[in-house]
Image (cartoon, coloured by chain):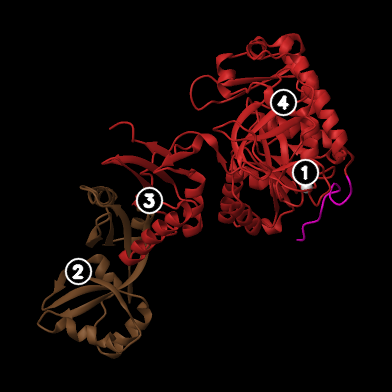
Chain colours: A red, B brown
Amino acid sequence: MTKTAGHGLGGFNPVSAPDYLPVPLLRDLQLARLQQIVRRAYENVGHFRKQMDARDLNPDSIKSLQDISKLPFTVKNDLRDTYPFGLFASPMGDIVRLHASSGTTGKPIVVAYTKDDVEVWTSAMMRAFAACGVGSGDIIQNAYGYGLFTGGLGAHYGGEALGATVIPISGGNTDRQIMVMKDFGVTAIACTPSYFLHLLERASELGVDFHDLRVRVGIFGAEPWSETMRRRIEEMSGIKAYDIYGLSEIVGPGVGIECSCQCGLHIFEDHFYPEIIDPVTNAPCAEGEEGELVLTTLSKQAMPMIRYRTRDITSFVEGPCACGRTLRRIKRIGRRADDMFIIRGVNVFPSQIESALLAVEGTLPHYQIVLTREKGLDQMEVQVEVTAEVFSDRIGALEALHTKLESELEHTLGIRAEVRLVEPHAIQRSEGKAKRVIDKRNLG
Amino acid sequence: MKIHQLSLFLENKPGQLTAPCRDLADAGIDIRTLSLADTQQFGILRLIVSDWKRGYELLRDKGYVVKDTEVVAIEVPDRPGGLLEVLKVFEKSAVNIEYMYAFTFGRGDKAVLIFRFDDPDAAIALLNSAGINVVGSVEVYNR
Ligand SMILES: [Zn+2]
């Protein structure tokens, strides 16, 4: 079956109009909204006012967009320290929704929305779907989790408002997902990229070929994924795979999305103002230079976030996009500032190790990085679980794999790492985010 | 006649052999012979068991990385030069012997060796034309 486009593809969707705002108008709008939001936060959020006062700043200090760099940062701990409602700028009477993100440790982070906030979020999600060609006539299988997590409801509201048909299937129950996709003629799916890969694997076990289904678009987010993974997904399924970006602290999904060019994510910067800074010096990065993404919500009423440190590492994509959108683009996020470690003076991200393992094995095996210090010298051991795909009954083949892994790692990282092949399940599984780095250097 | 060998990945640490052997014994699957090839870091345990299909599924479901490989059991005269006669068959052929190990039982004055060839079908054809006895699977699994 050929994959026919829904009604949304090809034609211009009016919801996308703000994506094409002329840049000077966009900057004026951003400045006006920034001034308003700083005033709102200053007048209603004690935590923010204290930080402003300590810097001798007040809402009138913002005279240009560049002045944003004077403002204090907000970090995740600020949300924890003021748990649950300390950063709210609206009375509970105006708040219509609460979400919470599961922190890996301790208390969750609570976020709030007024009616207007839900509308802004919905419009951002509509624009996100529209940017990847989804519209009225499409059937969206929404396999993001519904609940405290923002993914499910965010995509749900956006899809419905766009006039698409939304199936609120939520996550899990893979066999039913595949049945629904087939029987309901689903044309678009929203979920995490790793869950989609799992769907593909299960479908092939069940004898279902995605090329025979009507699904043509995937909107994948909520975790970092790579260009290699995109290619694999697209080859295996025949769909177009788009990267969507968002985080609960800012709004949820819909902060940014790829357009049909698939060359960077457009940020809906009329609502979410992006900066990229050096995570160590906090200085703004030059155009194209990699750094930490910092976001300011320009229109959020219930919980304005001023200069929120996302810990996500990216860079601005230079130049205008072929799609004509004037919204700035960021590179897909492959790593987080928190994940970085330094060994023998070299900055290493687990994502680099992943790409090396992926290059050798074709799929990403379970792995763990163990850092130790021997005689004052840092050592890195990468433990890699042997999978059925790479296992051989011949010693020589396994030794060749071992050598290949070590040389690929050295090539990617620029430093030597020991590879240790371990048995399946030798590496402890954790609920949620995997613990990739065990740093034993400070213990001895 | 090819027979099925199961290979398992094991880390090279004490006691690693016990668990898979116990798992097989608990399921009533007999180990006909085993051989361990190892390096400093890891080892490959190669097994011929009484019921390879059930053994394969059991070990896989228990979470082992297990591979099923076709090998050839060959009867070798248990006297000086006996093995040499077999090896000579392959000397000038394109068939490679990846590895070999002895079976735990013999038959009278003959020993049985397990050979892993890169091309087992070609190997069997060569052995047959040289008049060397390839041991049948029923005999191996039920021994
Ligand atoms: Zn674009």
Task: Look at discs 1 and 4 and give the one toward the viewer.
Answer: 4
For disc 4, the marked residue is A68
Residue in front for this viewpoint, A75 or B66: A75
Query: What type is the residue that disc 3 sits on?
Result: Ala
Image coordinates of residue A294 in percent, x first then y, are 65, 31
Badge 4: residue crowd in 10 Å (few <14, some 14–19, many ≥20)? many
For disc 2, the marked residue is B103
Q: Residue at position x 47%, y 49% from top?
A: A353
Query: Eyeballing the image, is A117 above or below B126?
Result: above
Query: What type is the residue that disc 1 sits on?
Result: Ile
Asked which quadrant contains residue A245, the reply is: top right
Image coordinates of residue A233 in percent, x first then y, are 63, 54
Query: Eyeballing the image, is B126 above or below A158?
Result: below
Name the chain letter of the residue that bears numbered label 1.
Answer: A
For disc 1, the marked residue is A139
Q: Are marks 1 and 3 on the same chain?
A: yes
Query: Eyeballing the image, is A401 above or below A112?
Result: below
Query: What type is the residue that disc 4 sits on?
Result: Ile
Q: Secondary structure at mark 1?
A: strand
Q: Are marks 1 and 2 on the same chain?
A: no
| Residue B87 placement, left or right of A283 | left
Image coordinates of residue B59 in percent, x first then y, are 35, 52
